[in-house]
Image (spheres, helix red, strand yellow):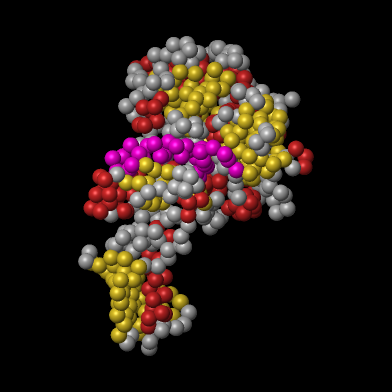
């Protein structure tokens, strides 16, 4: 039997005084009561209304959420507060509350001081429409997914049946509560079981470590985009004994990364599978020998359609039964393997996005005639875009070049999408690669990006004279070293420049020996994509040193000596 305190009457039966912790100290039930009373007093809300809610602080978000419920209002939860998101929501909600620039209602400051904290709270009916979660539909328009308070309680009870332990461990999260996975696992489940959670979201795994080492025990709520890049140089052994479990969702975690994190933190990595429509429906823990199949959450019935799609039936699934967009294959014991999606909703770094919406938004630019978005999977999953330019776009390309045009188009998309969802790779073509039937096969679009990794500068000319060499090079925008260094403003890493100097020193000046160390290295000016750069090399055979200097008409970019032995 569950020991949870249901959301329907949680305010009158809260299990403990401390709810959350953070930079400002403990956040108690008394603090929460005061914040709910304040918001319930100042919001110009009426029963039955729908209000958009956004706030980075989980405790303040919870206060807003419960105040709206006490007022008989539905909380509409967007994934972000970008201007394009707000504009799309404007016609669907009655108000905005929280951190919405230019949209939120104005609150009287005096009311916070004069507000009387309530001691009795309304008990909510199970069919109360508590939430609307907004997610990308197949047309690109945000789709509202309704959740009753009973559906939320059913899902939480199922999770508690599966994993009733670890209630004494504080919840640390890299996930925002503005997405349904974070809302359930970071906020509502801990709340109903009396488990403390951190108010602030961790941006980096180093933040996780710094919080974890100050706690007697913790659980980590995260995603593949964070766990797949966990910093292994951090002294995880110092906190591993305190970690009770790791939860991951938003996309499947690779076995390699799952085993790595489990080894670093000495704790099981539990992956959660589901969607905003269904909530959590399955889970797995990967191992060296396991087949990677998923097992259903208690209270959920999983079957297969004639098209091999996963069909979900359960009390916390609103439109039950619900057919997922994932093809599956069932294996022994009622478990299943995921075989891939059939729609145009994809996940990039764990964030769900409609390719249709990306295409539509970029086509609003005067420079783009038609565009097709694709997903490229290499070391990471990223969005790519193939586009036919308008006449104005072709003129702009000739005038400012590919890199600057890409930057303009990315800026055009920044109001609509989070940075991780912006296209990282672009191809401008005369015509999209249609086949003879007039269709646009995905493999033809993918092929435009299936080129060999670019690791070297494009050599324009070179001279070699005894122990000296000089090269003039173009720095291609496609270099792998620009990937992730840095997003939106790529620059050539210093380590790549040293690598090139050593490579060309060995190739042109017959430098021999093993790389030993660097001397007097200076990085004075950054090198951008599409730059024309000269590299001067001089080999000092008697001292086994190679001097290098990268320079251009802007001056010296970097210089130093490589020592060999």
Residue 554, position in %: x, y? 22, 64
Residue 9, position in %: x, y? 60, 17
Residue 313, position in %: x, y? 67, 27
Image position of 494 (left or right of 190): left
The residue at 45%/14% (across/down) is 49
In the rendered view, tell whether residue 163 sits above or below residue 265: above
The residue at 33%/78% (across/down) is 537
Q: Which residue is more in the foreground, 309 or 165? A: 309
Q: Quadrant of residue 497?
A: bottom left
Q: Quadrant of residue 517?
A: bottom left
**Highlighted range, magenta:** 340-369
In the rendered view, tell whether residue 122 sits above or below residue 291: above
Q: Is residue 167 visible?
A: no
Q: Which residue is more in the foreground, 334 or 59? A: 334
Residue 504, position in %: x, y? 39, 76
The residue at 46%/77% (across/down) is 515
């Amino acid at each position: 039997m569950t020991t949870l305190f249901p959301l329907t009457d949680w305010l009158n039966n809260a299990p403990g005084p401390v709810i959350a912790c953070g930079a400002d100290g403990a956040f108690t039930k008394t603090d929460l009561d005061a914040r709910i009373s304040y918001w319930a007093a100042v919001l110009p809300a009426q029963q039955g209304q729908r209000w958009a809610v956004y706030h980075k602080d989980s405790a303040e978000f919870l206060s807003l959420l419960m105040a709206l419920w006490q007022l008989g209002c539905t909380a509409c939860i967007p994934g972000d507060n970008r201007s394009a998101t707000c504009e799309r929501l404007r016609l669907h909600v009655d108000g905005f509350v929280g951190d919405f620039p230019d949209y939120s209602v104005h609150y009287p400051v005096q009311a916070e001081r004069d507000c009387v904290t309530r001691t009795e709270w309304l008990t909510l009916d199970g069919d109360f429409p508590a939430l609307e979660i907004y997610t990308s539909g197949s047309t690109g328009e945000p789709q509202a997914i309704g959740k009753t308070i009973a559906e939320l309680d059913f899902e939480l009870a199922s999770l508690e049946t599966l994993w009733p332990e670890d209630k004494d461990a504080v919840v640390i999260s890299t996930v925002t509560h503005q997405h349904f996975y974070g809302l359930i696992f970071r906020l509502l489940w801990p709340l109903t079981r009396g488990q403390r959670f951190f108010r602030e979201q961790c941006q980096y795994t180093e933040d996780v470590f710094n919080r974890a080492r100050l706690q007697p025990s913790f659980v980590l709520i995260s995603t593949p985009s964070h766990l797949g890049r966990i910093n292994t140089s951090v002294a995880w052994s110092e906190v591993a004994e305190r970690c009770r479990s790791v939860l991951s969702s938003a996309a499947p975690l690779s076995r390699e990364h799952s085993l790595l994190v489990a080894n670093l933190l000495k704790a099981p990595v539990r992956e959660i599978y589901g969607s905003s429509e269904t909530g959590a429906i399955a889970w797995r823990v990967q191992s060296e020998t396991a087949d990677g199949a998923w097992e259903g959450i208690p209270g959920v019935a999983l079957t297969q359609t004639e098209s091999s799609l996963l069909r979900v039936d359960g009390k916390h699934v609103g439109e039950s039964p619900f057919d997922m967009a994932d093809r599956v294959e069932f294996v022994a014991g009622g478990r299943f393997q995921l075989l891939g999606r059939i729609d145009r909703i994809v996940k990039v770094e764990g964030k769900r996005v409609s390719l249709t919406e990306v295409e539509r938004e970029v086509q609003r630019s005067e420079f783009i005639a038609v565009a097709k978005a694709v997903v490229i999977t290499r070391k990471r999953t990223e969005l790519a875009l193939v586009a036919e330019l308008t006449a104005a776009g072709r003129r702009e390309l000739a005038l400012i070049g590919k890199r600057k045009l890409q930057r303009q188009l990315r800026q055009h998309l920044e109001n609509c999408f989070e940075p991780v969802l912006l296209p990282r790779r672009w191809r401008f073509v005369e015509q999209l690669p249609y086949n003879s039937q007039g269709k646009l096969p995905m493999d033809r679009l993918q092929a435009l990006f299936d080129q060999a990794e670019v690791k070297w500068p494009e050599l324009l000319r070179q001279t070699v004279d005894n122990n000296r060499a000089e090269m003039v090079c173009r720095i291609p925008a496609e270099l792998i070293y620009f990937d992730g260094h840095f997003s939106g403003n790529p620059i050539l890493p210093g380590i790549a420049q040293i690598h090139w100097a050593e490579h060309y020193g060995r190739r042109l000046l017959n430098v021999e020996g093993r790389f030993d160390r660097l001397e007097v290295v200076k990085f004075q000016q950054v090198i951008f994509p599409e730059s024309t750069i000269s590299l001067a090399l001089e080999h000092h055979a008697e001292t086994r040193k190679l001097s290098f200097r990268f320079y251009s008409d802007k001056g010296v970019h970097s210089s130093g000596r490589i020592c060999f032995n």
